[in-house]
Image (tube, grey):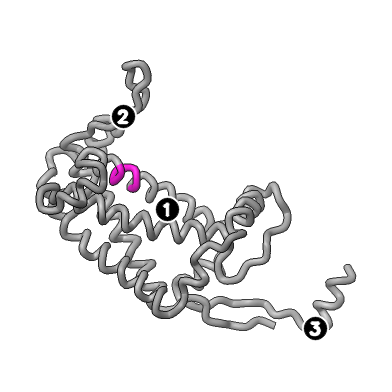
Amino acid sequence: MKQIREKHSLVMRWTHWVNFPMLMLMIWSGLLIYWANDAYSINILGSTIFQFFPQWFYKFLNLKQRLAEGMAFHFFFMWFFFFNGMLYIIYTVVSGAWRELVPKKNSFSEAWQVLLHDLHIRKTIPPQKKYNAAQRIAYTIIIFMGLGSIFTGLAIYKPVQFFWICWLCGGYHVARIIHFALTIGYVFFFLIHVVQVMLAGWNNFRSVVSGFEVIDNETPHKAKTKTHE
């Protein structure tokens, strides 16, 4: 017998879906800014092994010669990104939803088992409630990453006015490196998140959109029969 039950609240879904386009806009406008000083690369013994990003990348996405536009978009949408994130944090604290998101003492060992299950190496998965151990760790880390982006972003945006933030970050250049690394982290998180949603199936994706999920409750007779198979 199938049953419909609520899984995600409106605020959780709102902040989730608003954050996605905001993050994309922040990354896009950040690339427009980064074009003006693309200093980062991987070098070994004086030779460049990997460059962030090659010139064809800027040309293909039409990112060149748009520094002022990138700064305008980046510093405008960062406020939406910030307030949306704060709304999410305040809601999880006030509603008590943080208890379902914060990792437990055994979350790291269980997260490894979840990973092996996702890779089809392990058949069973640890008992889970609304979020599994890997999700608890990932969603908690992403909150701190968002705070780190705001923190380092202010240090880059106003290094004189927010000199104390810049100092706490280790200086302007260190703050810029951390800000760039966090952006790369968002990209990897997004890609992994999409793969996980695909593996979880349609019912999971539908619950993030509508807030409800469909569960299949077996009758006691069927459940008893299944245990003897």
Amino acid type at mark 2: Ser
The tag on residue 220 is 3
The tag on residue 41 is 2
Instruction: Give how far apart the Cα atoms at labels 2 and 1 are.
Output: 23 Å
Where residue 114 sits: x, y (%)? 62, 55
Asked if residue 127 lies left or right of residue 54, the reply is right
Residue under pointer 1: 190
Dot 2 or dot 1: first in sequence order is 2
Where residue 61 sits: x, y (%)? 25, 41
Going by the picture, which residue comes out furthest to the right? 228
Amino acid type at mark 3: Pro
Where residue 195 sits: x, y (%)? 51, 53
Residue drawn at (43%, 51%), measured in percent from left and top? 189
Residue drawn at (37%, 67%), measured in percent from left and top? 17
Instruction: Give how far apart the Cα atoms at labels 2 and 3 are.
Output: 61 Å
Q: Which span is picked out in magenta?
A: 178-182
Q: Residues within 10 Å of mark 2 (few under 14, many from 20)?
A: few
Residue drawn at (65%, 81%), measured in percent from left and top? 2
Q: Is residue 208 above or below residue 217?
A: above
